[in-house]
Each structure stands twice: as C-alpha cells, then as structure tokens.
C-alpha cells in the first residue's frame, strides 16, 4: 500500500478523539508531501536540523511537533514555529524553552515526558521529579510555556502485559497531575503514547495522541 492508503487505513482504526502525529524522521520530503496531499497536517520530527529543513520545503499550515530529546542550544531554531514539544524532561529544559518563547513573543505548548519503560536508555521524568518541577517557583514564574499533557514511550517488547502496564502507569500520572495541578486548565488534555506497534493498546489505556511512523511511511530511509 502507498502512504495515502496507509493513512486512510490508520484513521479508520483510530477513534475521533485520538490525534495522529505522522512521525516523518528520516523520510524524504516527497513522502511528507504525499501525506499532506492525503489531508494530513501533523508531523513529528526528532532532529532539529532535519525539522527546520523540511519546514522550509513544505506548506506553512503544517503543525510541527518535536518528539525527540531536545538540546537546549537547539531550541532557538524551532521556537518561532513549533506547535508542540513532547519531550520536556527537566526544569532546565523548560526554562530555556520559556526564554526562547519570550524572545519570539509567543507561548509554546509542551508535554512532560515520563520514563515508563524498562530500558534505562530512554529519557523522562519520574512522578516525583514531575511534581517537584510543577511545585517549583521557577515553573510558576514561567509565562510563555503551557504544559498541555504528558508523553511516554513503552518498552520495546513483545510482552503485551508489560506494555499495557506501562501505558496504564502513564495514564495514572496524567490523572494525578490533572487532579492536583491542572484541574481547571482545559488545555491539559494530551496523553501522547503509542506508536506503530502498540497504538491500539495505548488507545485502550487512554492515549489521546499517537505517534505513527512505519505504519504510514513504511520503513525509514537511512
């Protein structure tokens, strides 16, 4: 199947309340153009340089998400246009995003990234670190960022029980933070979890935003 057919099939399997980020990292611009022509508008990249280059070649109404580990010295290159940063894993990073948002006279939406997987190589906060961040004076003084939800990546595993448990844990974090810190903030609604191999399971466990690469574009072009 081609990209257009893949998108149609994917969207037919996803509830209306669940958004889809087309993970386009390492895919050629032509592949993104095909997805765009099929009506898709949300694309996710994990390398700043690649994101900036693609943005210059594609229509301006695309909603760009940054989904990878973000270095503080690279924020300035995306701060003027990025729609959502999925990967906030420290108060230091959030502070730098806020600083660049001030320079660009805008508010940048962000997700707190949690470490829920068994692999130590994955980035993310634990729930205590997230609460320390949200309770901090530094965070409360930030006016140019808006935390709209949370993100997490499950273990790379065929163990469905393990992956379901990790997604369930992330959903529990969302409910806790919503109840304590964001009860009256309607924009705190995003649970970004689930990729090509486990998105149906993630949706069962409460995901509202899935990150899909190979199921749309096929295998990456290295």
Image (spheres, rainbow, N blue to C red):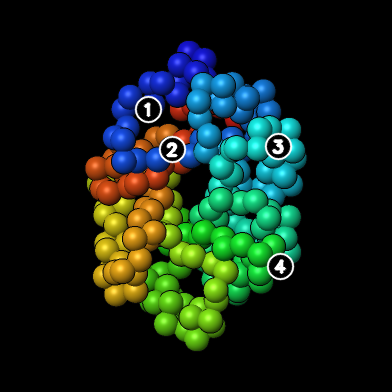
Residue 177 screen position, x and y as percent: 32, 69
Q: Residue at x 71, y 67 (%)?
A: 103
Q: Quadrant of the C terminus?
A: top right
Q: Is residue 198 or residue 2 the one in the foreground?
A: 2
Instruction: Determine whether 19 is above or below 123 in the image.
Output: above
Q: SS class of the residue under badge 1?
A: helix
Give the number of the disc on residue 11.
1
Q: Secondary structure at mark 4?
A: helix
Specify the quadrant of the image occupied by residue 148.
Answer: bottom left
Give the image location of residue 157, x and y in percent: 38, 43
Any part of residue 54 in sight: yes
* Cα distance in 3D space between marks 2 and 4: 30 Å
Which of the two labelled residues, at mark 2 and mark 4, occupies the earlier sequence position?
Answer: 2
Gap in angstroms between the C-alphas marked 1 and 4: 37 Å
Local crowd size for mark 3, using a 10 Å CA cut-off: few (<14), some (14–19), many (≥20): some
Binning the other alpha carbons within 10 Å of mark 2 as few (below 14), some (14 to 19) or many (20 upward) gives many
Which residue is farthest bottom? 137
Q: Earlier in the sequence, mark 3 or mark 4?
A: 3
Residue under pointer 2: 20
């Amino acid at each position: 199947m081609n990209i257009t057919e893949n998108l149609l099939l994917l969207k037919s399997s996803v509830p209306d309340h669940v958004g889809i980020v087309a993970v386009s990292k390492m895919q050629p611009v032509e592949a993104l153009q095909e997805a765009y022509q099929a009506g898709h508008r949300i694309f996710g990249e994990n390398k700043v340089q690649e994101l900036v280059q693609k943005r210059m070649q594609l229509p301006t109404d695309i909603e760009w998400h940054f989904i990878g580990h973000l270095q503080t010295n690279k924020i300035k290159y995306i701060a003027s246009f990025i729609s959502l940063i999925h990967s906030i894993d420290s108060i230091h990073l959030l502070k730098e995003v806020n600083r660049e948002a001030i320079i660009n006279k805008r508010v940048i939406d962000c997700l707190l990234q949690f470490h829920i997987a068994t692999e130590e190589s994955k980035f993310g906060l634990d729930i205590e670190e997230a609460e320390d961040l949200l309770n901090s004076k530094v965070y409360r003084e930030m006016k140019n960022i808006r935390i709209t939800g949370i993100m997490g990546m499950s273990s790379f595993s065929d163990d469905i029980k393990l992956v379901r448990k990790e997604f369930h844990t992330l959903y529990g974090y969302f409910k806790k933070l919503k109840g304590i810190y964001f009860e009256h903030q309607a924009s705190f609604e995003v649970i970004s979890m689930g990729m090509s191999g486990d998105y149906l399971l993630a949706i069962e466990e409460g995901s509202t935003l899935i990150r899909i690469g190979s199921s749309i574009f096929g295998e990456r072009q290295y």
